[in-house]
Amino acid sequence: MPIVPQNQSPKDKADDCNASAATFVSTIEPLMKAKCQNCHSNGNGADGVNLEGYENIKKQAAKGILMKVIEHQEGVPRMPKMASKFSDCDINQVKAWIAAGMKE
C-alpha cells in the first residue's frame, strides 16, 4: 500500500477524485458525518454549529464558513479540530457541490 501524506487520501489522485460528481447524499453527507458530526450534531452543536442534515450543512456552506474552516483559512478556526485537514479531494468535492448550487 502506498504511503499517503496526512492531508491526502488515496482517492486524491486525479484519476480517482471526480469532484464534479459530488452530491449531497453520496459525498457531502457521509463526509460531514465522518469528519464533523462528532462535535457538530443535534446532540453536540459545538459553538452553536450543527452540521447534521441537509439544511444545517447548506446553511453553513451558504455563509461561506464551511469552506473557510475546512481549507484552514486565516481568521477562522481550523476544522476538524484535533484531526487531520480534509484531503484535497474532499475539499474539491465540497467546493464543487457548493458551486453546483448545493442541491440535496
Image: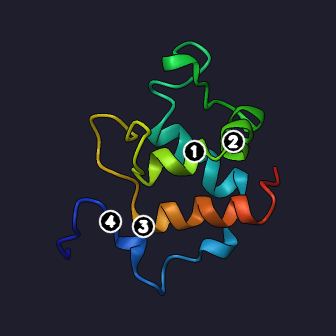
As drawn, the label of residue 8 is: 4
| Residue appearing at x 22%, y 67% in the figure | 5
Instruction: Classify mark 2: helix, strand or loop.
Output: helix
Disc 2 or 3, which lies upstream in sequence?
A: 2
- The image quadrant that residue 80 belongs to is top left
Instruction: Give the number of the mark in front: 1 or 4.
Output: 1
Frontmost residue, 66 versus 86: 66
| Residue appearing at x 23%, y 59% in the figure | 6
Instruction: Classify mark 4: helix, strand or loop.
Output: loop
Q: How is the image coloured?
A: rainbow
Q: Is residue 59 left or right of residue 104?
A: left
Q: Is residue 85 left or right of residue 38?
A: left
In the rendered view, tell whether residue 65 sits above or below residue 51. Answer: below
As drawn, the label of residue 63 is: 2
Dot 1 and dot 4 residues touching (CB under 8 Å): no
Q: Residues within 10 Å of mark 2 (few under 14, many from 20)?
A: few
Dot 2 and dot 3 residues touching (CB under 8 Å): no
Farthest-out residue, bottom: 15
Q: Amino acid at mark 3?
A: Asp
The residue labelled by disc 1 is 66
Q: In this figure, what is the number of numbered marks?
A: 4
From the top left corner, tell me how far across and down residue 47 is, in percent: 50, 18
From the top left corner, tell me how far across and down residue 21 is, in percent: 68, 72
The residue labelled by disc 3 is 88
Dot 3 and dot 1 residues touching (CB under 8 Å): no
Frontmost residue, 65 versus 88: 65
Instruction: Give the number of the mark in front: 2 or 3.
Output: 2
Dot 2 and dot 1 residues touching (CB under 8 Å): yes
Instruction: Classify mark 3: helix, strand or loop.
Output: helix
From the top left corner, tell me how far across and down residue 41 is, in percent: 57, 23
Instruction: Give the number of the mark in front: 2 or 1.
Output: 2
Q: Could you give the CA–CA distance between mark 1 and mark 4, rounded to whole angstroms? A: 19 Å
